Amino acid sequence: MRIKPIRNEEDYQNALQRIDEIFDAKRGTDEGDELEILAILIDNYENENFPIGMPDPIEAIKFRMEQMGMKQKDLAEIFGFKSRVSEILSKKRKLTLEMVRKLNTTLHIPTEVLVQDY
């Protein structure tokens, strides 16, 4: 087992190839330990070099509504008025702190996503 830091694309590809080779290694074995360490190194490299930004707050709401089979009228129960739902989803009105709290509780959208500028 020779593990080294992943510093470039070649190191990254080599680590991915090695993980593929030892993917079914049993925990507690030398290969199992190697697999665990390589997975951590790959995760760190990917987070640094291929970051995934947070989604747009309104798109996150629409996506979650779709996942839950919700309609705009269902959001009216959260926001209070149908017209307000339309204004929010068309970005004509900003989310209030109370709306963010209700969306977080009801739709389980992280507050970090909902409080972003849009």
Image (tube, rainbow, N blue to C red):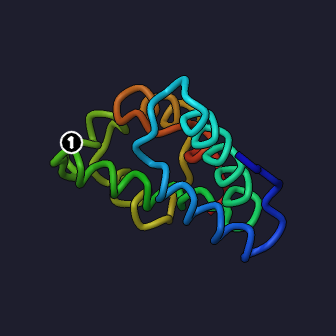
**Secondary structure at numbered mark 1:** helix
The amino acid type, in three-letter code, at marker 1 is Asp
Residue 38 is left or right of residue 49, and the answer is left
Q: Position of residue 63 (x, y in %)?
A: 33, 56
Q: Quadrant of residue 51?
A: bottom right
Q: Is residue 11 above or below residue 57?
A: below
Q: Quadrant of the C terminus?
A: bottom right
Q: Is residue 65 above or below residue 7?
A: above
Q: Quadrant of residue 75?
A: top left
Question: Of 83 and 97, which appears nearest the observer?
Answer: 97
Q: Position of residue 88 (x, y in %)?
A: 44, 56
Q: Position of residue 34 (x, y in %)?
A: 63, 41
Name the residue rendered at 34%, 59% in the picture: 86
Q: Is residue 44 above or below residue 108?
A: below
Name the residue rendered at 26%, 34% in the picture: 77
Name the residue rendered at 27%, 49% in the picture: 65
The residue carrying mark 1 is 74
Q: Is residue 62 above or below residue 104?
A: below
